Amino acid sequence: MAALPSGSLKRGEEVGRSVTLDDITKTTFTSLGSYKSSELGREVYVGLKEYPRREGKNLKTALRNNVVRDLSVIRAIAERFPHLEEELPLFYGLLLDSQGNYIGMLTEDFSRGKRYEVKQGVLLDVPSEIEPLFEHRSKVEYEGVVEMVFLVDTDDGEERRFGDFNTVLGGISPDERNRIFPLADIVEFGEDKYTLRLDYELG
């Protein structure tokens, strides 16, 4: 997160949103622009996931819990299946305003500023090698794993990416979760390591 140039972030177009069965917005995903990464030698696109129905302490608690949970899934995939690492987000963390208020979750924008269409994957798009991570799931619960898979229609063809981890751990027992996706050391690592605090208004 430290490599992100906070001064270049600016709220752009809404890329997507998720809604409840009665059409109430749960989350929104908005483009925040891009920057040239000297480390990667290419343009990196930034996006913001927000929870419009939550605010104050409720929002803070949800974001802190969600980002730790998601980082545990990202780490498990990266460590056990390094050949899939390039399909994971380049970065993932929290975004705070200049007053220290929690805004949302900061991550890579796969649509690259809404340039490319991003579609939800299907069961056949889930790489078979990661199935052992989720072998405790029923068929219905496994749909939550499918929801983390996205297909991006780039100029070079369809690209698979992993990006929405909030339903991945549904149906897993606490003991199983701690064994496969441990959280404690991520919490101990320190929130400041995966948090970007702005010194200006995002707009």
Image (tube, rainbow, N blue to C red):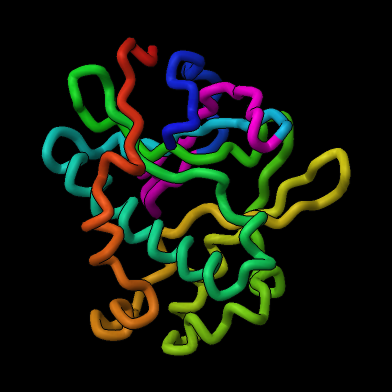
Quadrant position of residue 86 = bottom right
Direction from residue 148 to residue 70 in the image, left or right: left
Residue sitting nearer the eye, 127 or 139: 127
Above or below residue 145? Residue 110 is above
Image point (61%, 23%), residue name: 35
Q: Farthest left residue?
A: 57
Image point (19%, 41%), residue name: 60
Q: Farthest right residue?
A: 156
Above or below residue 164? Residue 201 is above
Above or below residue 75? Residue 93 is above
Direction from residue 185 to residue 85 in the image, left or right: right
Estimate the x, y position of residue 56 in percent, counting from the top left: 14, 33
The region drawn magenta spans 17-40
Image point (49%, 54%), residue name: 164
Image point (31%, 56%), residue name: 68
| Residue 25 seen by the camera | no
Residue sitting nearer the eye, 3 or 9: 3
Quadrant position of residue 141 = bottom left
The N terminus is located in which quarter?
A: top left
Estimate the x, y position of residue 185 in percent, counting from the top left: 27, 64
Estimate the x, y position of residue 136 in percent, counting from the top left: 42, 88
For the stretch drawn in magenta, the main secondary structure is: strand
Estimate the x, y position of residue 143 in percent, counting from the top left: 51, 72
The C terminus is located in which quarter?
A: top left
Above or below residue 111? Residue 64 is below
| Residue 84 seen by the camera | yes
